[in-house]
């Protein structure tokens, strides 16, 4: 039975779906789930009471895609996770530009605080953030959450305690460390 005080926070691009280097996933035709990501979300959802996506999407603020484009991507993602037998409890998205200094934009903690308001049982110290950027890591640190860095083909940055090449590798890492 999942522990509802434990939430799994996931970044989107580069963790769940393929990142487009130097660009944005602007529409559903560009959205590609990474191998094993859906299955990993299912497995992790058996441990974590909440599965939450927190994603910066400044392409909206730049006018490169619309809120409707991103909503279509998130609906598709939710459907794919549901079809695999998992769940996404909520997807929080910050469309602001980095220059806007919006507290919702990671490394700001606004999306985490919104999740806590929506799911008051969340205990950040018992939760986990998985991301592929320094801003994801700082988001986790500011909320007092453990963090796993997804490296892809790159080496993990310094000061990273845990890293994996992909989200698909995370369930095995958690099994070894718990």
Image (spheres, rainbow, N blue to C red):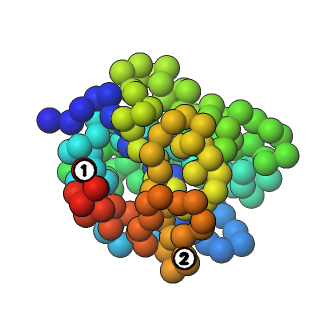
Outermost left residue:
1
State which tag comes first along the sequence, 2 or 1. Answer: 2
Name the residue carrying label 1: 178
Q: Residue at x 46, y 69 (%)?
A: 32
Provide the secondary structure element on which disc 2 rests: loop
Question: Residue 96 is drawn in which quadrant?
Answer: top right
Q: Nearer the viewer, residue 47 or 62?
A: 47
Provide the secondary structure element on which disc 1 rests: loop
Q: Residue at x 80, y 53 (%)?
A: 62
Question: Where 21 falls versus 66 (above or below)?
Answer: below
Please say whether residue 99 is visible from this viewpoint. yes
Q: Residues within 10 Å of mark 1 (few under 14, many from 20)?
A: few
Question: Residue 166 is drawn in which quadrant?
Answer: bottom left
Say whether residue 88 is left or right of residue 17: left
Q: Nearer the viewer, residue 138 or 106?
A: 138
Outermost right residue:
99
Rounded to the nearest angstrom, the CA distance separating label 2 from label 1 is 24 Å
* Disc on res. 155: 2
Q: Residue at x 39, y 27 (%)?
A: 122
Question: Where 89 falls versus 26 (above or below)?
Answer: above
Question: Where 109 falls versus 65 (above or below)?
Answer: above
Asked if disc 2 and disc 1 are in contact, CB closer than 8 Å, the reply is no
Q: Quadrant of the N terminus?
A: top left
Q: Nearer the viewer, residue 29 or 15?
A: 15
Q: Nearer the viewer, residue 138 or 24?
A: 138
Q: Residue at x 20, y 45 (%)?
A: 46
């Amino acid at each position: 039975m999942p522990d509802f005080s434990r939430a799994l926070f996931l970044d989107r691009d580069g963790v769940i779906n393929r990142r487009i280097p130097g660009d944005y996933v602007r529409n559903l035709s560009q959205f590609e789930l990474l191998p094993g990501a859906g299955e990993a979300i299912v497995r992790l959802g058996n441990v974590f009471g909440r599965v939450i996506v927190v994603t910066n999407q400044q392409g909206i603020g730049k006018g490169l895609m619309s809120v409707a484009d991103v909503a279509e991507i998130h609906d598709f993602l939710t459907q794919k996770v549901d079809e695999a037998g998992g769940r996404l409890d909520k997807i929080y998205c910050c469309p602001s530009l980095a220059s806007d200094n919006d507290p919702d934009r990671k490394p700001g903690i606004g999306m985490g605080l919104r999740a806590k308001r929506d799911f008051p049982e969340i205990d950040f110290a018992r939760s986990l953030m998985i991301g592929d950027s320094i801003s994801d890591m700082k988001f986790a640190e500011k909320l007092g959450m453990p963090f796993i860095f997804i490296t892809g083909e790159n080496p993990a940055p310094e000061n990273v305690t845990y890293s994996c090449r992909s989200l698909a590798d995370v369930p095995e890492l958690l099994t070894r460390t718990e």
